[in-house]
Amino acid sequence: MRTAPSAFARSCSAVQFSAWKQVPPRLCSRVSASGAAAFRDFAPGKPACRGAPRSAGPSPSPAPSSTLSAPFPGAEAMATRWASLGLRAPLARPPPPRRSRFWLAAPGGVRLGSSSSSASPGAGALASSLVRTGGFVGGRWVQAAAAFPVRDPASGAELSRVADCGAAEAQAAVRAAYEAGAAWSGASAKERAALLRKWFDLMIENKDDLARIITAENGKPLKEAQGEILYSASFLEWFAEEARRIYGDIIPSSAKDRRVLVLKQPVGVAAIITPWNFPSAMITRKVGAALAAGCTVVVKPAEDTPLSALALAELANRAGIPAGVYNVVPCSRQQAVAVGEVMCTDPLVAKISFTGSTATGKILLRHAAGTVKRVSMELGGHAPFIVFDSADVDKAVAGALASKYRNSGQTCVCTNRFLVQKGIHDAFVEKFARAIKSELRIGNGFDEGTTQGPLINEKAVEKVEKHIHDAVSQGASIVTGGKRHSYGKNFFEPTLLSNVTTRMLCTQEETFGPLAPVMKFDTEEEALAIANSANVGLAGYFYSQDPAQIWRVAEKLEVGMVGVNEGIVSAVECPFGGVKQSGLGREGSKYGIDEYLEIKYVCFGGL
């Protein structure tokens, strides 16, 4: 178990330390003093300071330079190796100018800017070398017939206009991935691992710029965005190591003249469809495993957050990932159906990996059935959080705060239903309300001290309002929060409801927002019945100090991941996934790479 530096640990609250524990131990030494401060400030007890108003301008993709430079030391030797395998080397580019920056301008001033070395770009600066606006297909940046806007959810300002790729661009990306597949799978595991490791190193070198991109397009507080980048990069590091551990098998044969072998081989082209709430980590968790296995990929990022996927493409290109191995096809909501259909029905695609809603997952499964593709899906959750009478209430409150309000409640493993045993119910609700008021601060993600940024769009806010109105109309009480915040139309107060029943919408479907409904229960059996009544089962949490109860409940909860006296369970080395209608397969861990491998049995006879 990791031990945080003593001074840092003493300065952390329980919620802040939970965030720190998500960072893999091997990355802790890479976190600078400012990075440690980022985790210390995850849920600070001080008011958010309002920075200067901001907006951003469009950022056209620079044309590739005709003067090429090696993307990393030893690139020439690597390029020779790629040529021998039939791979086209990635497009190299000169180091980006140090002075050129994009910044977020004053309200209404949607524009580009270039700062001198003496100018301060401000908290909202985005590195121009990582802000790309074209699709990335076959190692080249491509434009489409139209472009769609990417907006800052905090202000509504347009950050950029990105190529609105359609079916034709998706087909080209699939073809590029297919053509690169044979050579990439033919490269040694050591070579693939080296490139993934280089990609990881570049993410760490550019972690602050990548985090600012996430905050700009997603809205989450900068401290959380910095944590996501470390988490995201760790999947590239992990799967770089796992690439060399794809072991086959030898099976004793019943016939003396035969030898039986088992090989593991890449499935082929993988279509990767990712959500907006973790726009970097959801890509690397899938792509790291796919590339390590020898697959090539086509990524369709969420229309709300394409800039993070394109920034990863830029760094993959610099790392030396060969052309066609990693492709990105951004598109608007209007083009999403056409692009998704190509990725799910094209016979050249062998595998689909999707993270998103259960409803969308079912549509993709129907598309995939036509060509019987391999599928892995991480779908919706409806996580229960059970607090038994034996629990340490203070620890349960800290875990509840971290589990519910990270990313303003917009994660698939966020607690959606709180079940508290009657003996400690009132004490838990009182302390939980006090913690919400003292530790959570609403504000722009770039503002110092912010722990709660905006929801992704107004539709998300309306769903939270709908759930609260339904609950209150049926007798629920608002303990704290309950309305939009004056900061902006996409900001909503962290809300706590009591006197909640199972008849209310907020206990029947995923809210995906900063709403914590609390139900009172009498017995362990009653709590388990309520928790397991959902048709999904991604994550579940409970707090108890009774060893026998811990074993019983952990085994009986119908979910794929269980947090026992712990509010955050995600870690690179642990299998992430659910049961029931929460999905198929697992991501991360040693099991994640198996989703991109086929098992082949080989029988040698006549020996």
Image: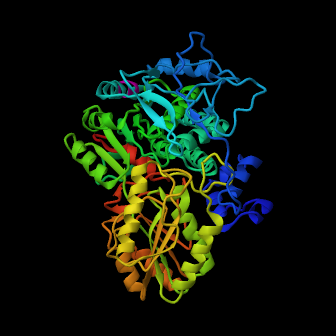
The residue under the point 38% across, 72% down is 471
Q: Is residue 512 at all visible to an observer of this figure?
A: yes
Is 18 part of what is drawn in magenta?
no
Horizontal and vertical percent position of residue 182:
38, 27
Q: Which residues are magenta?
A: 176-180
Residue sticking out furthest to the top: 66
How many labels sit on residues?
A: 0
Q: Position of residue 585 (x, y in %)?
A: 37, 54
Is residue 177 found inside the magenta-colored segment of the image?
yes
Toward the viewer: 39 or 52? 52
- Image quarter where the C terminus lies is top left
Query: Residue drawn 77% across and 49% down?
Result: 33
Question: In the displayed structure, would residue 172 be above or below residue 351?
Answer: above
Q: Residue 163: x percent and y percent?
A: 42, 26
Q: Position of residue 307 (x, y in %)?
A: 50, 35
Residue at the (71%, 60%) spot, across then down: 46
Instruction: State whether the magenta stretch is mostly helix, strand or loop.
Output: helix
**Nearest the camera: 580 or 115?**
115
Residue 194 showing in the rendered view? no
Nearer-the-camera pick, 488 or 602: 488
Q: How is the image coloured?
A: rainbow
In which quadrant is the N terminus drawn?
A: bottom right
Indicate whether 467 appears above or below 119: below
Residue 552 picture quarter? bottom left
Residue 605 shown left or right of residue 471 in the figure: left
In the image, farthest residue toward the left: 370
Q: Is residue 201 left or right of residue 63?
A: right
